[in-house]
Image (cartoon, grey):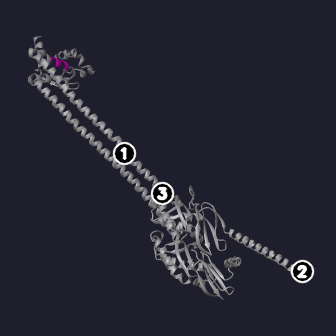
Amino acid sequence: MAAGRGGGSAEEEVRRSVRRTLANVVTILVCFGLLTAWILLGLYQLEPGQAAVILRFGRYSRTVTEPGLKLHLPPPLESHEIVNIASIEREEFGMRPGETTEPSGEEALEAAVQTSDNNIVNLGFVVQYKVKDAFASRYRVADPRSILRDAAQAAMREVVGRTTIDGVLSEKRGEVESETQEVLQGILDRYETGLDILAVQLQEVQPPGPVRDAFDDVLAAVQDKTRAVNEAEGYANEVLPKARARAAELAAEADAYRKARVAEASGESQRFTALLTEYRKAPDVTRKRLYLETMEAVLPRVEQVIVEPGTVVPWLSIGRNAKGAPPVSSSAPSAAPAPAAPRAGAR
Amino acid sequence: MRRVLFFGLIALAVFAALVYAGNLGWGPLVITREDQQQLVLVFGKPVSILIRPGLSLRLPLLSDVVTFDKRRLYLNAEPLPIQTRDEERIVVDNYVVWRIADPLAFYQSFPTGRAQAESQIDRVVRADLREVVGRRTLAEVLTTARPEIMESITKQSDSELKQAGIAIDDVRINRTELPSGTESNVYARMRTERERLARKLRAEGEEGGRRIRAQADGEARVIVAEATRDAEVTRGQGDADAARIYAEAYSSDPDFYGFVRGLEAYRKALGPGTTLVLPPTAEFFRLLESEGSRR
């Protein structure tokens, strides 16, 4: 019995030790399984453009940016939070681009901005930004988007408030944009928002509705000014060539006059010289002939009175008074009436 | 060895469980996250202030933990009508960025929490806005003095709220609206300014135009006058040349020239309508007379 018990106990001993070993193995396996499962809870996947902020016992440990399958200490020892750092976000303010009607309500309040010369201008702009510091954007500031919206408006109003309305409407737009970006980035950095402002763009800048016609009229006046000057230049371009043309005419006329005078003079001189040559050959005859020829030509044309010295003599009329008709061809038919006249006068 | 491993695992599991419980607010471990700060209270009495993130110990069961936000917080205030020094009314819209700087003072000042604190901040900032903006003229508020105003309001409200454990990082005016009456005044002024500018531009255009025209007219006149002068000189030369040529020819027999030229003058000068008085002794009639007497 003892032996049997002894044999049984040995057998039992073996069985017990096997059972214990089995239990140990199972326990260890289970423990390792649980441990592995727990460790695997620390797995996470990171897409390109994402960053994981890792906290250990709530304290910042590291930021992981390379994409892929990643492992951190299993929760609750470490925890991670994934933030998009590549995507570009966009916020719009005030007037929407292309809008022609007056904005109203909240949009109107957002749009109306005062300039340095105490004018009001309606504008719309867009801010583009992205997260540059994933940790700060999560753990340094609450509600970064609301802060961005208000800070952007404050920055724009500050910058436009330093600029004249003419500047905002035209040549200073670029300056307003870049200065606003600078001011806004400064404000956001001061709050540690971890946001990076990529661009501030003015979409619409318009004078307010009630005064828009006056602004349009100024633009029209600029055109008018240019046109007035252009017209005057056109006038000048017309007047000066005309004057030069007149000058050329005068010069040409004068030149022609001079040449004509010289030509006439030399012609007449030559005629005189020729006549003189002949006259010198027979002076008396020529002299008489010339005189009579002249009288012959002249007398038919004139009304003449012949006066006998000391006596009253009736006047003798020749030509149109006597005949009642004008001597139209007074020079051509001079030969005919001329001899008639003296004869009539003699009667 | 096996035992070490076994107890190690057990310890790890217990630790993990405690951390997990700490996250839920139970047990002896307190986890302070980066965006948190905490107060440990025993029977309502603060015993420690946890500002730095990480693990801390506390008395389990008997202690309470109150958690506060450590981040910068955003508070948008209602638009506030204010009268400026020059008695203009203006509506100022602002926002506040603040944080809990001293959790203990904050907890004591605002036992019910953040909403209570926000209404207190709102009150203080409004009062400061009224005071600071009220010392300025409308023009200053709208433009030049803006950053200065915001800075002094920030400083003032920060120092007033310091005792309550609140730090004011920034009070910023994002909008200023003019009341509708003032707005129409501004529009009227803008209109007159634009009209003045338009008139000035048009007048400048007229000025420029007239100046150019006058210059052109003047130049044209000078050109014509100079041309006239030159023409007269040329004509004079022509006359002189002619005179010289005549003189050269006629001086060979001045007497005969006088005769011929005289006859020519008669031809030209005596025309229709001329009454010629001649003595009977005139050369022309001499022949007639002698003929008549002969008859």
Residue A100 spot, x, y in % from top left: 56, 56
Residue A145 spot, x, y in % from top left: 59, 67
- Amino acid type, residue under disc 2 in the picture: Gly
Which residue is depicted at the point 53% across and 82% down?
B162
- From the viewer's perspective, is A250 left or right of A139? left
Subunit of mark 1? A
Tell whether position A273 is magenta: no
Which residue is depicted at the point 68% across and 82% down?
B27
Q: Nearer the viewer, residue A101 or B291?
A: A101
Q: Secondary structure at mark 2?
A: helix
**CB atoms at circles 3 and 2 under 8 Å apart?**
no
Q: Nearer the viewer, residue A109 or B27?
A: B27
Upstream in sequence: badge 1 or badge 3: 3
Q: Quadrant of residue B57?
A: bottom right
Upstream in sequence: badge 1 or badge 2: 2
Q: Please determine whether, in this image, residue A268 is positioned above or below residue A34.
A: above
Q: Secondary structure at mark 1?
A: helix
Q: Distance from label 1 to label 2 (Cα)?
A: 139 Å
Q: Quadrant of residue A116?
A: bottom left
Q: Where is mark 3, residue-wise? A: A215
Q: Distance from label 1 to label 3 (Cα)?
A: 27 Å
- Amino acid type, residue under disc 1 in the picture: Glu
Q: Secondary structure at mark 3?
A: helix
Q: Which residues are magenta?
A: A292-297
